[in-house]
Image (spheres, helix red, strand yellow):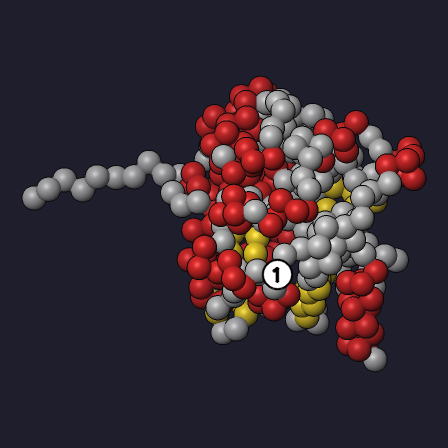
Amino acid sequence: MAEVQGTCEPRFESVHSPVATYWPEFAQAGKEKIEVRHIMGHTAGLSGWDEPLAAEQLADWDLCTSRLAAQAPWWEPGTGSGYHAVTQGYLIGEIVRRITGDTIGAWFAREVAKPLEADFHIGLPASEDHRVSNVIPPPPINLDAMGGQISELMLKTFMNPPIDASMAHHEWWRRAEIPAANGHGNARSVAAVQSIIAGKGQARGVRLLSAEGTDPIFEVQAEGIDKVLGVPERMGMGYGLSNPPDMAMGPRACYWGGYGGSVIIMDQDYEFTVCYIMNRMESGLVGDLRGANIVAAAVTSLLA
């Protein structure tokens, strides 16, 4: 009888486990104690890359992840949030790859998009190119008007590499897996995926998590002025948490907004998900009034 060979792939244990448990090379430069939750909560101190990157190098997964593994944190991990604008996708994606053996795009397609019938892709197949509505780049950000709001961390995070929205028009961008920046879908597909949170682990008749599996989202990881964005943030695990008076949502609500104006809100008490996605971008980094007004109207209708 042939011998059955075992596997050395690690099994995910907890968001409180060190990242190096799953990704040993990550322990370089004093990062051996950084936990998965620090990456989920934007508190890992890795909001950008030390070494210069050209924009097209974002398509080189091994290059981007190996550089993050080698560099030291920019601040003491766990002491505050700093929006990991693009790096969070690589960090989470590499943990997924080390555990499952799949890229984040392949894993997401099989384990999330397919069971939910969500038309969302991380790494767009060429067969779907004809369906893409190109984003309309936003007006340039007026750095002079921002004055003292610009910090060294903000510049290091957003300017290496500088990302021009028109990059999304190019084939290399569509084919790459840049999980925090180049997902392709629409509001319906984003809402379908995120309704798993509002439904405490299930949506569309599919259960992907236990009800308890969504609880860590609401564990506060950081509260105060975000080191990169320069605005108040209350960070949970992978999401911003309800932060009155900016959001009239309940204690089991979470959200995020994106460059150009997109926004997603989930509330478990109301089993409620609302999403706004656009292709005409504005210059805001975490949403704008177009999405906020839609969310406010939806919330008002619930409370009426």
For the residue pair 175 and 230, the one nearer the viewer reads as 175
Q: Quadrant of the C terminus?
A: bottom right
- Above or below — where is 284 with respect to 280? above
Residue at the image position 55 percent from the left and 33 percent from the top: 57
For the residue pair 277 and 44, the one nearer the viewer reads as 277
Residue at the image position 49 percent from the left and 36 percent from the top: 61
For the residue pair 151 and 215, the one nearer the viewer reads as 151
Instruction: Pinpoint residue 284: horizontal percent, then vertical percent.
Output: 79, 49
Say which quarter of the image contains residue 144.
top right
Provide the residue designation for mark 1. 133
Residue at the image position 45 percent from the left and 55 percent from the top: 126
Say which quarter of the image contains residue 92.
top right
Side of 106 relative to 153 (left or right): left
Instruction: Pinpoint residue 95: horizontal percent, then vertical percent.
Output: 49, 39
Instruction: Pinpoint residue 97: horizontal percent, then vertical percent.
Output: 44, 41
Q: Secondary structure at mark 1?
A: loop
In this view of the protein, can residue 215 be seen by the observer? yes
Side of 27 relative to 38 (left or right): left
In this view of the protein, can residue 32 be seen by the observer? no
